[in-house]
Image (spheres, grey):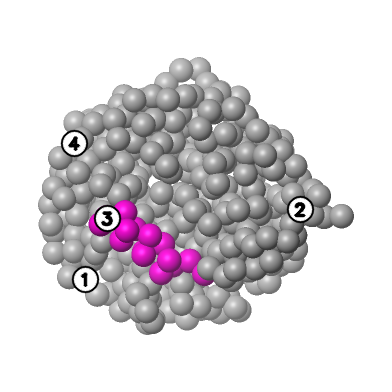
Amino acid sequence: MRRWARWVATLCVSLVVLIAAPSGGATTLTDWPQIGFDPTHTATNPFESILDPNTVADLGLAWQAELGGEGLFSAVVAGGMVFQTSYENGTVHAFDASTGTPLWTYRIAPNSLVQTPAVAGGRVFVSADTTAKLYALDQATGALDWTTQMENSSSAPPAVVVDGDTTSVYASGGGTVYAVDGSDGTVLWQQSPYEPFAIQATPAVADGVVYVADDHPVVHAYDATTGTELWASRPLAPEITAPSYVVVDGDRLLVAPGGRALFALDPTDGHVLWREQIYAGSQPSVANGLAYIQRRKDSEIRLMALDDATGDRVWQQDLGSPRVYSFCDGASIANGVVYTTSLAGAVLAIDATTGEKLWRYAVPVGARTMPVVVNGMVYAAAGRWLFAFGLQSWDS
């Protein structure tokens, strides 16, 4: 039932339309409206049908756009638009997804870490660390709709859940988790079991439960409607100073306390199902029985695939990047291909089953963002640029 409910949640936040593909068949047009694709944050697009292990080698640069500041976080795509934030100028940018034409820009504050947005109900929701606010911008124009003040700095992306005409936004600010009405910014409930600035990762939501982890790390489960705490569990890991991302994978939660092990927890009570000591360097992603995560124990960063039911290692692939202290957004998965970026300066596509490198594109600087893969396009930020890639044969 949990897997079925996850698909329902995905459909609630994704625009799905059948269109004619250039080959004469049918493909699916969809959105990637928040970090990790949907509120479970598996980072998997199950609707992609254009790019696959046989076609991805033909990817070429479709367009690139200058951001005016460093793109530290991942993009999102919704309604034919790409939304990307940038540091130094503390800005949210909107571009045409097909052409890269700038559509609007909203500036929050200089030198502000403006996180990956979430898009739903005609609004773009985004948080910033310097102002400790959650912002709602008009998706079409970028005009400010409302703001909600949070108690402390917010350094994590919001998550959105759509239920009919209702949009709920779940955000973390410092030591507090908030549920906010997406229509007007009203705080529906909040929980503050944490020390200030203890939460650095976005909440995950599935089956009416909100999961979030702090830096100790303790994983908490809350009723998504009332905010009532259902359980709290502390995996066997020391206190950390990097994000503890939670991914909901059907009958298990995957939790990666930054720089430590990867844990699988039972979502009903939080007990540990398995633990793999891999020195995690990114948030986990999962698809088709495999969990993907960047590992940075040795001199180079590697992408690893593990059996998500047991934690057994399946394959690993060198990303060509030296080990540095930089927690990455991780990998995305679509139609048998894993996409990731490298601090060595590359966007890569890797066979999801075998770990074989299928495609590599060099970018001017090291990249740490999760690529977004929708509608035969790949979007990834690196340095002060947002890059978009498409099949070269379609450009003629």
Image quadrant where residue 327 sits: top left
Q: Mark 4 or mark 2, which is nearer the start of the sequence?
A: 2
Q: Identify whether 262 is placed above or below 122.
A: above
Residue at the disc numbered 2? 62
Whole-Å distance between the Cαs marked 1 and 4?
Answer: 26 Å
Q: Secondary structure at mark 1?
A: loop
- The magenta region covers 1-15
Residue at the disc numbered 3? 2
Q: Mark 4 or mark 3, which is nearer the start of the sequence?
A: 3
Residue type, numbered disc 2: Ala
Q: Between residues 163 and 297, which one lies in front from this camera angle? A: 163
User: Which residue is depicted at the point 34% across and 25% down?
Assistant: 312
Tell me, yes or no, whether the highlighted magenta stretch contains residue 5: yes
Could you tell whether 195 is left or right of 259 in the image? Answer: left
> Where's residue 305, x and y in %?
44, 30
Residue at the disc numbered 1? 225
Q: Which mark is residue 272?
A: 4
> Where's residue 337, x and y in %?
56, 40
Could you tell whether 341 is left or right of 392 in the image? Answer: left
Q: Mark 3 or mark 2, which is nearer the start of the sequence?
A: 3
Q: Nearer the viewer, mark 3 or mark 4?
A: 3
